Amino acid sequence: MDGAIKREEIGGLMMVLEVSLPTLGAVLGTAVIDAVNPCAIGTLILLISTIIVAGRQKEMLKIGLIYIFAVFLTYFLFGLGLITFMAAIPQVVAEYISIGVGLLIVLAGLVEIKDYFWYGKGFSLMIPHQYVHVMEKKMKNISTKACILLGVFVATVELPCTGGPYLAVTLLLAQNFNMTAFLLLLAYNLIFILPLVVILFLVRFGIRLPAIQAWKQRNKATMRLITGCVLIALGWLLMLIANGTINLG
């Protein structure tokens, strides 16, 4: 009898793992790609350079980590809020929203691929210039407490540039939101900020900032191409799930 129960439990666990593997791969894979987003990295580089120019290297880790945590918390709460909204509306409305958002994400992916070939020409997904000037102003003489507000502000204005993959993943998780989906949302956001933390520590403990900037410049077009391909795939996946063609479980 005990053996039968154990077999049932193991079988149930295998079934759960089998159903959740596509979602797991989609969420974590997208997080890794989104984590090297040029906008997020570029904004951190701007903050670090401002700290260096101000001669506040000793405060770099404290200011940087508070800023990164604020970005993390803002994105995480945004994801939870969107999922709560999707759960509160009728399913048929949620399906139409998912189809519409999926189409927009596909279009965003095409824009990203365009930037691989013709970077900066025509419409691009980037932080609006007026907000860049606001960020530069806020970063000067920034206090530790102001880092939190800066992180929230930056996370919000970065959404046109960084929000596509996250929006798609959030809507995917909203299809069947449970504790596992909650942990996946948490994992996504932790992966997203990981390169920011690594860059912060590298600069603080020896790597020159121009080397990071040069790496970003060399790879930004490739990052746009990869992000664009992922966005197109996620957009189609959202639409196919919404109309019932695919069921990830």
Image (tube, helix red, strand yellow):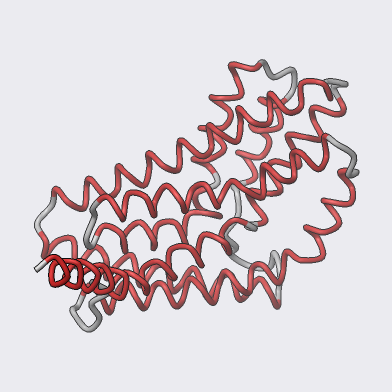
Coordinates of residue 232 in the picture (x, y in percent): 46, 76
Q: In the image, is 174 to the left or to the right of 218?
A: left
- Outermost residue on the bottom side: it is 245
Coordinates of residue 107 in the picture (x, y in percent): 45, 72
Out of 137 and 202, give the one closest to the viewer. Answer: 202
Residue at 46 percent of width and 51 percent of height: 187
Which quarter of the figure is the N terminus placed in?
Answer: bottom left
Out of 110 and 70, give the one closest to the viewer. Answer: 70
The image quarter containing residue 38 is bottom right
Q: In the image, is 223 to the left or to the right of 94?
A: right
Which quarter of the figure is the C terminus placed in?
Answer: bottom left
The image quarter containing residue 223 is bottom right
Residue at 58 percent of width and 28 percent of height: 150
Coordinates of residue 225 in the picture (x, y in percent): 63, 74
Q: In the image, is 179 to the left or to the right of 183?
A: left
Residue at 82 percent of width and 65 percent of height: 218
Residue at 85 percent of width and 29 percent of height: 52
Q: Is residue 201 above or below residue 187?
A: above
Out of 10 and 150, give the one closest to the viewer. Answer: 10
